[in-house]
Image (tube, helix red, strand yellow):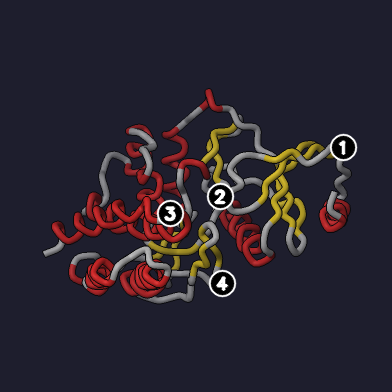
Amino acid sequence: MDAGLKRCLAAAGLTPKGKLVPLSGGDIAAVYHLTTDRGDVVVKHDAAERLAGEAEGLATLAAAESGLVVPEVLAQSEDWLVMEALEVASRRRDPAALGEGLRRLHRVTGEAHGWHRENACGRTPQPNAPLADGRAFQRERRLLPLAEACQARGLLDATLRGRIEALAHGLEAWLPNAPASLIHGDLWSGNVLFTSRGPALIDPAVYRHYPEVDLAMLTLFGSPGAAFFEAYRDGAPPDDWPRRETLFQLYPLLNHLLLFGGAYRDAVERAVSRLEIDTP
């Protein structure tokens, strides 16, 4: 076992009782299960900056008192993060509890969109310097930087990048500014666990922005179901949801294009085309 991990465990009063067992889902960082004298833990090995952002994000989500389960950070060193292991109970899925908890989380708001530090969405650095206007934040901190990065790697041509830039500069024409909600920031289905204690959130990339960011990520590759939306919306859909859903899926689609390659280009173009049709 790595000496740095041993020191990290010892600082938390944890003694390993077995070997590191790799867990699935470690495409970005190495993730392991470990049995200790105080129970099972999850261990993550990654770049120090990403781990620090994740640890802070977990603490922030826990402090929001949304009713959602958040794993406790037990120990942290420069390149190791040790968290409590959650008992997954897939037969106890409760999408309504997830919806209600996410609604409580999004009620925690601030004046500025962004965060006081940069973090990462996958391997992609996520600039979070705060802006008072959410439209400007979505444009300057999300869409334009990723469009530029994708073109620099040959994943977007100049025409499609120009279309994205035109949409980004036109947000003020249809998207109202709004208070900035605390959001998970990378809420795809793999970052939601249904545990014996209720729905849980893992692997956050927190900042403050439009709450539909989390909703759109949940629907990008599937749907959390009618019970989730009934609980989250309390029977009332958000204003202009289909268009907002498409807008806030564009950033993660660009990120997938950047991380995983050209297979996502068509999805990016389809999202752009839908927004162009919906926005005169």
Give the foreground label among 3 and 2: 3
| Amino acid type, residue under disc 1 in the picture | Lys
Kindly check if marks 3 and 1 are in contact, taking CB atoms under 8 A apart as contact.
no
Marks 3/1: CA–CA distance:
40 Å
Using the image, tell me which numbered label, if any, was put on residue 117.
4
First in residue order: circle 4 vs circle 1: 1
Using the image, tell me which numbered label, if any, was put on residue 106.
3
| Amino acid type, residue under disc 2 in the picture | Glu
Give the labeled residue for mark 2.
65
Mark 2 residue element:
loop
Image coords of residue 200 (percent x, y): 56, 41
Image coords of residue 123 (percent x, y): 55, 60
Give the foreground label among 2 and 1: 1
Left or right: 177 in relation to 87: left
Mark 3 residue element:
helix
| Amino acid type, residue under disc 4 in the picture | Arg
